[in-house]
């Protein structure tokens, strides 16, 4: 009987979830089911953006910026994983300013949720276009309709481009937070990641500035990476795509979207680079948080 009891105890311990030291709350508790390194309680409290109200910038509440601006926006859309609550602000502070690099896999896996949402949205949109085209052909009295013409087209990002940091910021932090998160997404989805951009000057902390100041700061803040190795990688990547007729699907990756001035400046530079190679591009952005 004692041996049976001991065996059952061992089985229960194997089946029961082990505890962990949560990266968010710091407590030892039951691990989350979907995210590595945090407890179940913190996972349940994550403020996911599941239904963006603004289809352009991905904001979860009303967005006056996109509606009032008459400027052309160089990205198709932005999608963010979470809303920037006080808890999310603390997590980003631990990662970005206090050098807790072990949070990168967690933030990267959270960003992957935003990528999945973007991918699903693009595929729904493409399916709708295909169905409309099929209906149009049928209305023209077609006697034959290809059963695959309205199938669900697959959408896949072709390249991830992290927002670069200045040399002084890189020395201060020791790493580029956007690049580390992009690395995680690249590994999970098999999408190449390339540091295609550099900062031309240090812009200071944007969190202390008003919208107009941020927009002014970001003008001409980025340029194409002059590193010959990076340019060669980009050219090889373009060659591997061959004579593809559809535009390149390029995704900018950053930690947070506030006014969008950083993303827009990066997108403008990427568009200029693609134009220089005679390549059409659709540019998107993914950020971990949306303020």
Image: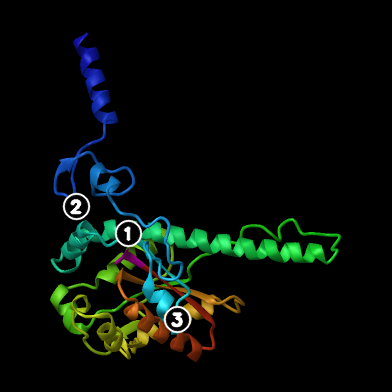
Q: Provide the secondary structure element on which disc 3 rests.
A: loop
Which image quadrant for residue 225? bottom left
Whether 27 is among the magenta residues is no
Q: Nearer the viewer, residue 244 or 178?
A: 178
- Of the 4 image quadrants, the one containing the C terminus is bottom left
Q: CA distance from mark 1 to mark 3?
A: 23 Å
Q: How crowded is the residue under tag 1: few (<14 C-alpha within 10 Å), some, or many (20+)?
A: many
Q: Which residues are magenta?
A: 287-291
**Label 1 with label 3: CB-CB less than 8 Å:** no
In screen coordinates, is 136 left or right of 3? right
Q: Earlier in the sequence, mark 3 or mark 2?
A: 2
Residue under the image location 22 percent in, 78 percent down: 206
Q: Which mark is residue 74?
A: 3
Label 2 – label 1 distance at C-alpha: 15 Å
Magenta highlight: main SS: strand
Mark 3, mark 2: which one is toward the viewer? Answer: 3
Q: In the rendered image of this protein, does residue 220 appear above or below residue 118?
A: below
For residue 65, which quarter of the picture? bottom left
Q: Nearer the viewer, residue 225 or 221?
A: 221
Q: Which residue is mark 2?
A: 24
Element at label 1: strand
The residues tagged by marks 3 and 2 sit, at their Cα atoms, a distance apart of 35 Å
Q: Residue at x 60, y 76 (%)?
A: 244
The reply to whether dot 3 and dot 2 touch (C-beta < 8 Å) is no
Residue 213 image offset from top left, x and y in percent: 25, 85
Q: Position of residue 26 (x, y in %)?
A: 14, 49
Percent of width and height locating residue 7: 24, 19
Q: Earlier in the sequence, mark 1 or mark 3?
A: 3
Q: Which mark is residue 82?
A: 1
């Amino acid at each position: 009987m004692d041996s049976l009891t001991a065996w059952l105890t061992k089985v229960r311990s194997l089946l029961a979830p082990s505890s962990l030291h949560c990266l968010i709350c710091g407590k030892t508790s039951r691990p989350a089911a979907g995210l590595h390194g945090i407890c179940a309680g913190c996972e349940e409290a994550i403020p996911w953006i599941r239904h963006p109200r603004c289809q352009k910038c991905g904001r979860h509440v009303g967005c006056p910026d996109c509606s009032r601006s008459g400027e052309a926006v160089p990205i198709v859309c932005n999608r963010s994983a979470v809303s920037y609550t006080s808890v999310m602000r603390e997590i980003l502070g631990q990662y970005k300013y206090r050098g807790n690099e072990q949070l990168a896999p967690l933030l990267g896996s959270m960003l992957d949720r935003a990528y999945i949402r973007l991918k699903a949205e693009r595929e729904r949109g493409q399916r709708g276009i295909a169905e409309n085209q099929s209906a149009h052909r049928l209305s023209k009295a077609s006697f034959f309709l290809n059963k695959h013409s309205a199938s669900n087209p697959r959408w896949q990002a072709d390249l991830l481009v992290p927002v670069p940091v200045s040399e002084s910021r890189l020395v201060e932090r020791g790493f580029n937070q956007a690049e580390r998160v992009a690395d995680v997404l690249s590994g999970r989805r098999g999408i190449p990641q390339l540091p295609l951009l550099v900062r031309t000057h240090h812009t200071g902390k944007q969190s202390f500035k008003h919208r107009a100041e941020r927009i002014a700061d970001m003008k001409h803040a980025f340029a194409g990476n002059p590193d010959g190795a990076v340019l060669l990688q980009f050219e090889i990547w373009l060659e591997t795509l061959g004579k593809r007729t559809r535009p390149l699907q390029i995704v900018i990756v950053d930690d947070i979207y506030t006014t969008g001035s950083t993303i827009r400046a990066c997108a403008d530079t990427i568009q200029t680079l693609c134009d220089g190679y005679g390549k059409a591009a659709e540019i998107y952005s993914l950020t971990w948080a949306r303020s």
